[in-house]
Image (cartoon, rainbow, N blue to C red):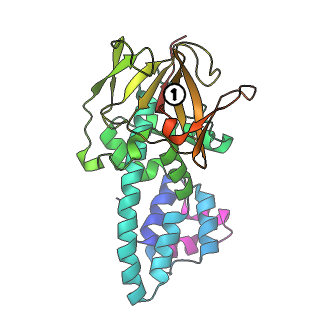
Amino acid sequence: MPEKSFAAALKRLRERAGLSQKALAAKIEMTGSYISQLESGSRRAPRPKVITRLCKALGVAERRLQELAALERSPPPIRKRLERANREQGRVRRTRDRLLVTTLFHMARGPRVIDPMAEFLDLPPEQRMLTGRLLGRVRKVKSLAEAERASDDLLAEADDKEREILAHVLPGVLTGSAPSPSAATTKQRLVDVHADSKRSADPEDSLELDPRLGSADSYFVRIADDEAHPRVEAGDLLLVDPERTPHGGDTVVIHRDGRDFVRTWHKQGGQVRLDATRAEVAPMRMSEDAFDGVVVLLLVRALR
Protein backbone atom coordinates (compact mmCIF):
# COMPACT_ATOMS: atom_id res chain seq x y z
CA MET A 1 0.00 0.00 0.00
CA PRO A 2 1.47 3.42 -0.92
CA GLU A 3 2.87 5.45 1.98
CA LYS A 4 0.85 8.38 3.29
CA SER A 5 3.83 10.58 4.16
CA PHE A 6 6.63 12.06 2.08
CA ALA A 7 9.21 10.81 4.61
CA ALA A 8 8.10 7.17 4.44
CA ALA A 9 7.81 7.21 0.64
CA LEU A 10 11.29 8.69 0.22
CA LYS A 11 12.83 6.12 2.55
CA ARG A 12 11.19 3.21 0.73
CA LEU A 13 12.29 4.47 -2.70
CA ARG A 14 15.86 5.04 -1.50
CA GLU A 15 16.11 1.57 0.01
CA ARG A 16 14.62 -0.01 -3.09
CA ALA A 17 17.26 1.79 -5.19
CA GLY A 18 19.95 0.29 -2.95
CA LEU A 19 21.34 3.68 -1.95
CA SER A 20 22.49 4.85 1.45
CA GLN A 21 21.38 8.26 2.68
CA LYS A 22 24.89 9.54 2.01
CA ALA A 23 24.95 8.12 -1.53
CA LEU A 24 21.60 9.66 -2.41
CA ALA A 25 22.67 12.98 -0.93
CA ALA A 26 25.80 12.96 -3.08
CA LYS A 27 23.73 12.49 -6.21
CA ILE A 28 21.72 15.65 -5.52
CA GLU A 29 24.64 17.60 -4.01
CA MET A 30 23.22 17.64 -0.50
CA THR A 31 24.36 16.12 2.80
CA GLY A 32 23.48 12.78 4.32
CA SER A 33 22.02 14.55 7.34
CA TYR A 34 19.60 16.41 5.03
CA ILE A 35 18.27 13.12 3.65
CA SER A 36 18.07 11.72 7.18
CA GLN A 37 16.00 14.71 8.31
CA LEU A 38 13.64 14.32 5.34
CA GLU A 39 13.13 10.63 6.06
CA SER A 40 12.55 11.18 9.78
CA GLY A 41 10.05 13.95 9.12
CA SER A 42 12.01 16.46 11.19
CA ARG A 43 12.45 18.59 8.07
CA ARG A 44 9.43 19.57 5.99
CA ALA A 45 9.09 18.18 2.49
CA PRO A 46 11.25 20.08 0.00
CA ARG A 47 10.23 22.23 -2.93
CA PRO A 48 9.34 20.71 -6.33
CA LYS A 49 12.78 21.34 -7.88
CA VAL A 50 14.51 19.36 -5.14
CA ILE A 51 11.97 16.53 -5.45
CA THR A 52 12.63 16.39 -9.18
CA ARG A 53 16.35 15.97 -8.47
CA LEU A 54 15.63 13.30 -5.86
CA CYS A 55 13.43 11.31 -8.22
CA LYS A 56 15.95 11.57 -11.04
CA ALA A 57 18.65 10.25 -8.72
CA LEU A 58 16.37 7.41 -7.62
CA GLY A 59 15.25 6.63 -11.18
CA VAL A 60 11.54 6.88 -10.38
CA ALA A 61 8.53 8.90 -11.52
CA GLU A 62 8.05 11.97 -9.37
CA ARG A 63 4.24 12.22 -9.26
CA ARG A 64 3.73 10.46 -5.93
CA LEU A 65 6.46 12.36 -4.05
CA GLN A 66 5.33 15.68 -5.52
CA GLU A 67 1.75 15.03 -4.41
CA LEU A 68 2.77 14.05 -0.88
CA ALA A 69 5.04 17.09 -0.56
CA ALA A 70 2.37 19.49 -1.84
CA LEU A 71 -0.12 18.01 0.61
CA GLU A 72 2.20 18.45 3.58
CA ARG A 73 2.97 22.06 2.63
CA SER A 74 -0.72 23.00 2.38
CA PRO A 75 -2.70 24.75 5.17
CA PRO A 76 -4.98 22.34 7.14
CA PRO A 77 -8.31 23.37 5.51
CA ILE A 78 -6.88 23.02 2.01
CA ARG A 79 -5.10 19.83 3.00
CA LYS A 80 -8.38 18.18 3.95
CA ARG A 81 -9.91 18.99 0.58
CA LEU A 82 -6.80 17.80 -1.21
CA GLU A 83 -6.77 14.59 0.81
CA ARG A 84 -10.34 13.81 -0.24
CA ALA A 85 -9.53 14.55 -3.89
CA ASN A 86 -6.32 12.54 -3.70
CA ARG A 87 -8.12 9.56 -2.19
CA GLU A 88 -10.55 9.47 -5.11
CA GLN A 89 -7.80 10.00 -7.70
CA GLY A 90 -5.69 7.41 -5.95
CA ARG A 91 -8.49 4.85 -6.09
CA VAL A 92 -8.87 5.33 -9.85
CA ARG A 93 -5.12 5.19 -10.41
CA ARG A 94 -4.68 2.08 -8.27
CA THR A 95 -7.40 0.30 -10.22
CA ARG A 96 -5.80 1.31 -13.51
CA ASP A 97 -2.31 0.33 -12.35
CA ARG A 98 -3.34 -3.07 -11.01
CA LEU A 99 -5.16 -3.90 -14.21
CA LEU A 100 -2.21 -2.62 -16.23
CA VAL A 101 0.11 -4.93 -14.30
CA THR A 102 -2.37 -7.77 -14.83
CA THR A 103 -2.17 -7.19 -18.58
CA LEU A 104 1.63 -7.13 -18.52
CA PHE A 105 1.64 -10.31 -16.41
CA HIS A 106 -0.37 -12.22 -19.03
CA MET A 107 1.59 -10.70 -21.91
CA ALA A 108 4.79 -11.96 -20.29
CA ARG A 109 3.47 -15.48 -19.71
CA GLY A 110 0.95 -16.13 -22.46
CA PRO A 111 1.81 -19.08 -24.72
CA ARG A 112 3.61 -18.03 -27.89
CA VAL A 113 3.12 -14.32 -27.17
CA ILE A 114 6.34 -12.62 -28.24
CA ASP A 115 6.48 -8.92 -27.36
CA PRO A 116 2.89 -8.68 -28.56
CA MET A 117 2.29 -4.95 -28.29
CA ALA A 118 5.50 -2.99 -28.85
CA GLU A 119 5.92 -3.53 -32.59
CA PHE A 120 2.32 -4.46 -33.29
CA LEU A 121 0.87 -1.16 -32.13
CA ASP A 122 3.68 0.99 -33.54
CA LEU A 123 4.68 2.41 -30.18
CA PRO A 124 7.38 5.09 -30.40
CA PRO A 125 10.88 3.87 -29.47
CA GLU A 126 10.79 5.24 -25.91
CA GLN A 127 7.47 3.50 -25.23
CA ARG A 128 8.77 0.25 -26.70
CA MET A 129 11.76 0.39 -24.37
CA LEU A 130 9.53 1.17 -21.39
CA THR A 131 7.16 -1.70 -22.25
CA GLY A 132 10.12 -4.06 -22.51
CA ARG A 133 11.53 -2.99 -19.15
CA LEU A 134 8.15 -3.33 -17.43
CA LEU A 135 7.64 -6.79 -18.96
CA GLY A 136 11.07 -7.74 -17.64
CA ARG A 137 10.06 -6.71 -14.14
CA VAL A 138 6.71 -8.46 -14.27
CA ARG A 139 8.32 -11.70 -15.51
CA LYS A 140 10.10 -11.95 -12.16
CA VAL A 141 6.81 -12.00 -10.24
CA LYS A 142 5.58 -15.49 -9.38
CA SER A 143 1.82 -14.96 -9.35
CA LEU A 144 -0.89 -12.61 -10.56
CA ALA A 145 -1.90 -11.78 -6.98
CA GLU A 146 1.67 -10.78 -6.19
CA ALA A 147 1.82 -8.63 -9.33
CA GLU A 148 -1.36 -6.76 -8.37
CA ARG A 149 -0.12 -6.19 -4.82
CA ALA A 150 3.21 -4.88 -6.10
CA SER A 151 1.79 -2.75 -8.93
CA ASP A 152 3.16 0.49 -7.49
CA ASP A 153 6.70 -0.90 -7.37
CA LEU A 154 6.49 -2.65 -10.74
CA LEU A 155 5.35 0.52 -12.51
CA ALA A 156 7.56 2.92 -10.55
CA GLU A 157 9.64 4.04 -13.52
CA ALA A 158 6.58 4.94 -15.60
CA ASP A 159 5.12 8.37 -14.90
CA ASP A 160 1.39 9.01 -14.94
CA LYS A 161 1.32 10.10 -18.58
CA GLU A 162 3.20 6.97 -19.68
CA ARG A 163 0.83 4.77 -17.69
CA GLU A 164 -2.14 6.39 -19.41
CA ILE A 165 -0.55 5.71 -22.81
CA LEU A 166 0.06 2.07 -21.92
CA ALA A 167 -3.45 1.74 -20.55
CA HIS A 168 -4.78 2.92 -23.92
CA VAL A 169 -2.66 0.66 -26.14
CA LEU A 170 -2.50 -2.55 -24.11
CA PRO A 171 -5.28 -5.16 -24.46
CA GLY A 172 -8.76 -4.05 -23.53
CA VAL A 173 -8.84 -4.90 -19.85
CA LEU A 174 -8.97 -1.22 -18.99
CA THR A 175 -12.38 -0.48 -20.47
CA GLY A 176 -15.32 0.52 -18.35
CA SER A 177 -16.61 -3.04 -18.37
CA ALA A 178 -13.43 -4.45 -16.88
CA PRO A 179 -13.79 -6.06 -13.45
CA SER A 180 -12.19 -4.47 -10.40
CA PRO A 181 -9.00 -6.07 -9.03
CA SER A 182 -10.93 -7.36 -6.02
CA ALA A 183 -13.18 -9.33 -8.36
CA ALA A 184 -10.29 -10.70 -10.37
CA THR A 185 -10.03 -14.39 -10.99
CA THR A 186 -7.27 -16.45 -12.59
CA LYS A 187 -9.75 -18.93 -14.07
CA GLN A 188 -9.19 -19.10 -17.81
CA ARG A 189 -11.85 -19.20 -20.51
CA LEU A 190 -11.69 -20.92 -23.88
CA VAL A 191 -11.70 -18.56 -26.85
CA ASP A 192 -12.49 -19.84 -30.34
CA VAL A 193 -10.01 -19.55 -33.19
CA HIS A 194 -11.57 -18.80 -36.60
CA ALA A 195 -10.09 -18.86 -40.07
CA ASP A 196 -11.51 -15.42 -40.89
CA SER A 197 -12.98 -12.43 -39.09
CA LYS A 198 -16.50 -13.16 -40.38
CA ARG A 199 -16.50 -16.55 -38.60
CA SER A 200 -17.83 -18.07 -41.81
CA ALA A 201 -17.05 -21.62 -40.64
CA ASP A 202 -16.91 -23.55 -37.39
CA PRO A 203 -13.96 -22.77 -35.08
CA GLU A 204 -10.79 -24.58 -36.04
CA ASP A 205 -9.29 -24.47 -32.53
CA SER A 206 -9.55 -22.74 -29.16
CA LEU A 207 -7.08 -21.14 -26.75
CA GLU A 208 -7.24 -20.43 -23.04
CA LEU A 209 -7.35 -16.73 -22.19
CA ASP A 210 -7.74 -14.57 -19.12
CA PRO A 211 -11.44 -13.58 -18.92
CA ARG A 212 -10.54 -9.90 -18.54
CA LEU A 213 -9.02 -9.72 -22.00
CA GLY A 214 -11.83 -8.46 -24.19
CA SER A 215 -15.55 -9.12 -23.96
CA ALA A 216 -17.28 -12.49 -23.81
CA ASP A 217 -17.75 -12.27 -27.61
CA SER A 218 -14.03 -11.92 -28.35
CA TYR A 219 -12.44 -14.49 -30.63
CA PHE A 220 -9.17 -15.18 -32.44
CA VAL A 221 -8.68 -14.72 -36.18
CA ARG A 222 -5.89 -16.68 -37.88
CA ILE A 223 -4.33 -14.48 -40.56
CA ALA A 224 -4.02 -16.33 -43.86
CA ASP A 225 -1.37 -14.29 -45.69
CA ASP A 226 1.41 -11.73 -45.36
CA GLU A 227 -0.60 -8.77 -46.68
CA ALA A 228 0.10 -6.84 -43.45
CA HIS A 229 3.76 -7.89 -43.17
CA PRO A 230 5.87 -7.12 -41.16
CA ARG A 231 3.35 -6.19 -38.48
CA VAL A 232 1.28 -9.34 -38.97
CA GLU A 233 2.38 -12.49 -40.80
CA ALA A 234 0.56 -15.54 -42.12
CA GLY A 235 -0.39 -17.86 -39.27
CA ASP A 236 -0.48 -15.16 -36.59
CA LEU A 237 -3.53 -14.99 -34.37
CA LEU A 238 -5.32 -11.72 -33.63
CA LEU A 239 -7.66 -11.44 -30.67
CA VAL A 240 -10.55 -9.26 -31.84
CA ASP A 241 -13.53 -7.85 -29.98
CA PRO A 242 -16.73 -7.11 -31.94
CA GLU A 243 -18.11 -5.23 -28.92
CA ARG A 244 -15.33 -2.66 -28.89
CA THR A 245 -15.81 0.67 -30.67
CA PRO A 246 -12.73 1.72 -32.69
CA HIS A 247 -10.88 4.92 -31.89
CA GLY A 248 -8.22 6.81 -33.79
CA GLY A 249 -5.08 4.72 -34.26
CA ASP A 250 -6.70 1.39 -33.33
CA THR A 251 -5.69 -1.69 -35.30
CA VAL A 252 -8.69 -3.34 -36.93
CA VAL A 253 -9.49 -6.29 -39.19
CA ILE A 254 -11.94 -5.82 -42.04
CA HIS A 255 -13.22 -8.53 -44.38
CA ARG A 256 -13.49 -7.73 -48.10
CA ASP A 257 -13.73 -9.99 -51.16
CA GLY A 258 -13.22 -13.14 -49.13
CA ARG A 259 -10.07 -11.88 -47.39
CA ASP A 260 -9.13 -10.26 -44.10
CA PHE A 261 -7.20 -7.00 -44.15
CA VAL A 262 -5.34 -5.57 -41.16
CA ARG A 263 -5.58 -1.79 -41.08
CA THR A 264 -5.22 1.23 -38.81
CA TRP A 265 -8.51 3.02 -38.13
CA HIS A 266 -8.79 6.81 -38.42
CA LYS A 267 -11.86 9.03 -38.44
CA GLN A 268 -12.08 12.06 -40.73
CA GLY A 269 -15.37 13.89 -40.25
CA GLY A 270 -18.09 11.36 -41.01
CA GLN A 271 -15.65 9.21 -42.99
CA VAL A 272 -13.31 6.41 -41.95
CA ARG A 273 -9.82 5.97 -43.41
CA LEU A 274 -8.16 2.58 -43.00
CA ASP A 275 -4.40 2.79 -43.50
CA ALA A 276 -2.32 -0.21 -44.59
CA THR A 277 0.95 -1.16 -42.94
CA ARG A 278 2.88 -0.25 -46.09
CA ALA A 279 2.88 3.29 -47.45
CA GLU A 280 2.55 2.17 -51.08
CA VAL A 281 -0.84 0.53 -50.39
CA ALA A 282 -3.72 2.96 -50.81
CA PRO A 283 -5.99 3.41 -47.77
CA MET A 284 -9.57 2.17 -47.73
CA ARG A 285 -12.23 4.84 -47.26
CA MET A 286 -15.88 4.51 -46.26
CA SER A 287 -18.56 6.16 -44.19
CA GLU A 288 -18.41 5.50 -40.48
CA ASP A 289 -21.73 3.66 -40.66
CA ALA A 290 -20.37 1.35 -43.36
CA PHE A 291 -17.42 0.16 -41.27
CA ASP A 292 -18.06 -3.44 -40.27
CA GLY A 293 -14.63 -4.51 -39.05
CA VAL A 294 -13.48 -5.58 -35.59
CA VAL A 295 -10.93 -4.05 -33.24
CA VAL A 296 -7.73 -5.98 -32.50
CA LEU A 297 -6.73 -6.36 -28.85
CA LEU A 298 -3.76 -8.71 -28.96
CA LEU A 299 -1.32 -10.37 -31.33
CA VAL A 300 -0.22 -13.97 -30.77
CA ARG A 301 2.79 -14.67 -32.92
CA ALA A 302 2.75 -18.02 -34.71
CA LEU A 303 5.63 -20.39 -34.08
CA ARG A 304 8.09 -20.26 -36.96
Q: Where is residue 93 in the image (x, y as percent from the top left)?
A: 41, 58
295 shown above or below 95: above
Residue drawn at x 75%, y 26% is 280
Question: Camera-side residue: 27 or 73?
Answer: 73
Q: What residue type is labelled 1?
A: Val
Report the magenta residues as a range.
Answer: 19-39
279 over 71 or under it: above or below:
above
Say which of 143 and 203 sits in front.
203
Q: Where is residue 60 in the image (x, y as percent from the top left)?
A: 56, 56
Q: Quadrant of residue 249?
A: top right
Q: In this view, does 302 lie above or below 36?
A: above
Q: Does the magenta stretch include residue 283?
A: no
The image quarter containing residue 251 is: top right
Q: Is residue 224 left or right of residue 149?
A: right
Judge the density around disc 1: few (<14), some (14-19), many (≥20) Cα neighbours within 10 Å: many
User: Whole-percent x and y of residue 123?
Assistant: 62, 40
Residue for badge 1: 253
Q: Residue at x 43, y 45 (%)?
A: 100
* Residue 24 part of the magenta-drawn span: yes
Image quadrant in which you'd find residue 210: top left
Residue found at the far right of this picture: 280
Q: Is 107 drawn above or below residue 200 in the view shown?
A: below
Q: In which quarter of the image is the N terminus?
A: bottom left
Q: Is residue 39 visible?
A: no
The residue located at (36%, 12%) in the rendering is 201
Residue in the picture at 33% in, 36% down: 215
Q: Nearer the viewer, residue 99 or 22?
A: 99
Q: How far from the left and from the top, in percent, is residue 4?
A: 38, 69
